[in-house]
């Protein structure tokens, strides 16, 4: 008894469930062992009758109570506990069997548990007829794990957990009223973990916690997990029509903490964001909102890209239920929602995953594989089945519980290459001597296969900055299985080009045209993301050369080029009205700029471009197919004018696009065209309503039979300065 008491008092009992609770001794008699540090007296009650069976004897000052009875037949019991003037009847947590079933354990070991988040973490359930909360966490190399929280005064002696030896999961079921304070939704908790040598580690937040405290506090929170009354069933059953490579996908990327703030520069909550953001995005004609990471993260300056809680929406803006309301309202407004997901690395905060059970459980032991030099973060061990299962489950949890429509996977290139940002000698080759992270490749394929098999209408997007082949090809064709890939090459080349003085652009003509060499190798998204307006790069507008008029004209022409170029569209908040300053995550966007006409003009331009993109099949139906594009002239470097035709599916009108990247005006400018007949000017970025000089064709032009540029007919047009023109060919 002394040894048990000492082990329990030191919170290092190797098998608390084998000792605590009701057990049969070697003579066949029932004995009771209870460790309740806050109790003064403890009695055993017959649960059926409520009668006192016996008073337990205090076996130690630390809180151990014991009694051997003359009974031999087990029975359902409760404990009557007195403390001060209060007397309570509680259920003994150590009287309950395992919550996890054999199939759960089998699937976990296999790495194929699709709903792992429903089993691990903290969940309000009814177990063996009693309501309470189940806690489960994976820590195979720990010698002791206990759940601690405000319900047990953060005392690791009160609720030591049972270790399931065949899988390394620790678990316990705690009835609602069996601790010193009620165990219920809203309670804060962590796991007290000791390594294999019984050394106490920093308290750990729940890796699969569904809710977290508002920073700087770091505890997990027991979530109510109430059934949510979704009203988006029609959206969920029909969303596939707008989430495929033939649809018009135009994405507005948002950082929820700085899109808008209140008058005190404090965060808006999810409800306030919904009231302002949804109608704004809807009015501008975007089809999707992409949220920078909303998984809980400790440091604002990481923008969410160093998450600790991959299953918990950040508490900065409200509760998980509030976030569901936000997404439901987006769907009611006809807007899809994408989330940024970060499976590439995690921070070294003590309460997170780092050396979770005293070993490199989630990360690699070897820093050449497990430490990320760019971000001072740790890299997941994708080859460990439990880790891969944990990560996949985190992504699917957002699709299941929050109805998100897509997952944008951050920093895929850093996952794919073992030598990413590493010098010779700083990385370890794979089994074939190459630099490919084969375990990460298998993980990403498995993630995409599961997403597309189980979530109709949802899609994945890779931020992949290299020429890795087949990122957006199906896995059965040798690809990684993503739905789309960010076109980083297009972004870098075109931004470099548009930042040059117009007089110099003729020497860099291929920075615009080169993207079409590989434009259909992948299903591309053209990204003007947050990464392009930080770290001294300035805003997109700030990159434009010339005086104010030329800067805005450049911007409008560039946006017109982007919206008519093959590929889906993504624009970071603020770019749609010409934000002047570099993005600052600590304050609202510069909305006051919309008091000025040039910024109003840019915003109206984006609204009209989105409308044009959605209403013109030629501009979106074959975004990802070479049949949807044909050059008219990509060689006119002297005048820095590009012209091309976009085609939709059979039966739709093609469009002819002309982009002039110099401030020169060209009258009677002849262009070849593939179709005879009327060419109606349906967009002109130089129009006066956008702040332009209003030079254009003001209606339609008709093709003549004059052959030009390898076409049997041609048109003569006026080309405005620094402008994009779009003609619908109605031949």
Image (tube, rainbow, N blue to C red):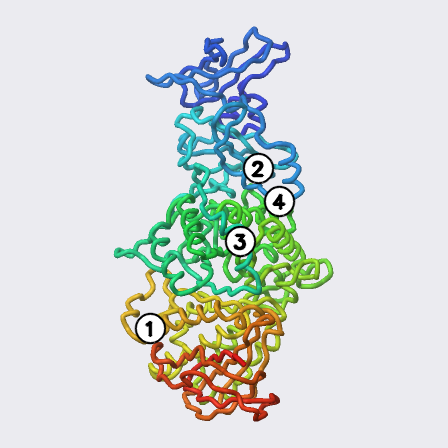
Q: Quadrant of residue 547?
A: bottom left
- Residue tagged 1: 599
Q: Disc 4 or 3, which lies upstream in sequence?
A: 3
Q: Are marks 4 and 2 in contact (CB under 8 Å)?
A: no
- Residue tagged 4: 386
The answer to whether residue 651 is above or below residue 451 is: below
Q: Disc 4 or 2, which lies upstream in sequence?
A: 2
Q: Quick one: 207 or 115, which is closer to the camera?
A: 115
On the image, the x and y values in percent for residue 92 come to 49, 21
- Residue tagged 2: 142
Q: Are marks 4 and 1 in contact (CB under 8 Å)?
A: no
Q: Closer to the observer: label 3 or label 2?
A: 3
On the image, the x and y values in percent for residue 21 come to 54, 19
The answer to whether residue 651 is above or below residue 114 is: below
Q: Closer to the observer: label 4 or label 1?
A: 1
- Residue tagged 3: 238
Q: Closer to the observer: label 1 or label 3?
A: 3
The answer to whether residue 230 is above or below residue 703 is: above
């Amino acid at each position: 008894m002394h040894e048990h008491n000492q082990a329990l008092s030191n919170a290092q009992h190797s098998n608390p469930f084998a000792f605590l609770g009701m057990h049969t001794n070697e003579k066949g008699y029932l004995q009771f062992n209870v460790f309740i540090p806050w109790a003064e007296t403890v009695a055993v009650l017959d649960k059926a009758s409520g009668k006192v069976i016996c008073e337990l004897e205090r076996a130690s000052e630390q809180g151990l109570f014991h009694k051997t009875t003359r009974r031999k037949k087990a029975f359902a019991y409760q404990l009557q506990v007195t403390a001060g003037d209060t007397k309570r009847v509680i259920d003994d947590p150590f009287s309950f069997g395992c919550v996890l079933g054999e199939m759960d354990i089998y699937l976990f070991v296999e790495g194929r548990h699709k709903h792992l988040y429903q089993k691990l973490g903290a969940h309000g359930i009814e177990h063996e007829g009693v309501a309470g909360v189940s806690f489960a966490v994976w820590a195979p190399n720990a010698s002791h794990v206990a759940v601690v929280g405000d319900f047990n005064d953060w005392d690791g002696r009160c609720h030591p957990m049972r270790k399931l030896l065949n899988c390394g999961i620790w678990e316990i079921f705690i009835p609602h009223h069996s601790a010193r304070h009620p165990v219920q939704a809203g309670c804060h908790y962590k796991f007290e973990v000791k390594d294999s040598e019984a050394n106490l580690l920093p308290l750990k937040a729940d890796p699969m916690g569904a809710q977290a405290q508002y920073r700087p506090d770091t505890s997990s929170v027991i979530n109510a997990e109430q059934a949510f009354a979704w009203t988006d069933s029609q959206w969920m059953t029909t969303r596939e029509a707008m989430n495929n490579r033939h649809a018009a996908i135009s994405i507005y990327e948002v950082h929820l903490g700085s899109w808008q703030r209140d008058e005190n520069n404090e965060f808006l909550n999810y409800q306030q964001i919904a009231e302002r953001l949804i109608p704004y995005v809807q009015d501008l004609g975007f089809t999707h909102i992409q949220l920078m990471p909303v998984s809980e993260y400790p440091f604002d300056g990481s923008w969410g890209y160093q998450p600790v809680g991959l299953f918990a929406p950040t508490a900065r803006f409200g509760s998980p239920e509030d976030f569901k309301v936000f997404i439901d309202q987006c769907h009611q407004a006809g807007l899809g929602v994408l989330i940024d997901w970060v499976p590439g690395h995690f921070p070294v905060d003590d309460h997170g995953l780092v050396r979770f059970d005293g070993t490199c459980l989630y990360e690699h032991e070897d820093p050449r594989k497990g430490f990320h030099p760019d971000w001072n973060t740790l890299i997941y061990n994708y080859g460990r089945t439990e880790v891969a299962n944990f990560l996949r489950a985190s992504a699917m949890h957002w699709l299941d519980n929050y109805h998100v429509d897509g997952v944008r996977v951050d920093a895929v290139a850093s996952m794919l290459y073992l030598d990413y940002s590493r010098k010779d000698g700083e990385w370890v080759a794979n089994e074939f001597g190459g630099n490919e992270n084969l375990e990460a490749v298998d993980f990403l394929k498995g993630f995409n296969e599961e997403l597309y098999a189980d979530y109709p209408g949802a899609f994945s997007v890779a931020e992949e900055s290299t020429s890795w082949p087949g990122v957006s090809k199906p896995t059965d064709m040798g690809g990684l299985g993503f739905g789309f890939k960010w076109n980083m090459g297009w972004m870098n080349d075109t931004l470099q080009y548009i930042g040059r003085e117009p007089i110099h652009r003729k020497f860099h003509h291929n920075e615009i045209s080169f993207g079409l060499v590989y434009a259909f190798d992948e299903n591309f998204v053209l990204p003007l993301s947050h990464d392009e307006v930080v770290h001294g790069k300035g805003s997109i507008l700030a990159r434009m050369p010339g005086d104010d008029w030329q800067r805005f004209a450049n911007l409008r022409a560039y946006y017109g080029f982007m919206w008519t170029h093959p590929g889906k569209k993504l624009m970071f908040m603020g770019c749609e009205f010409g934000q002047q300053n570099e993005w600052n995550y600590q304050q609202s966007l510069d909305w006051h700029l919309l008091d000025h006409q040039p910024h109003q003009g840019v915003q109206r331009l984006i609204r009209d471009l989105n409308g044009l993109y959605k209403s013109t099949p030629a501009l979106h139906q074959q975004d990802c197919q070479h049949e949807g594009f044909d050059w008219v002239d990509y060689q006119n470097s002297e005048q820095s004018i590009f012209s091309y035709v976009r085609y939709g599916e059979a039966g739709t009108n093609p469009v002819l696009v002309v982009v002039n990247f110099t401030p020169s005006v060209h009258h009677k400018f002849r262009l070849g065209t593939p179709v005879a007949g009327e060419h109606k000017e349906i967009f002109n970025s130089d129009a006066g309503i956008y702040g332009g000089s209003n030079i254009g064709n003001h209606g339609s032009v008709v093709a003549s039979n004059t052959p030009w540029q390898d076409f049997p007919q041609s048109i003569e047009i006026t080309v405005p300065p620094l402008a994009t023109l779009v003609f619908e060919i109605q031949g």
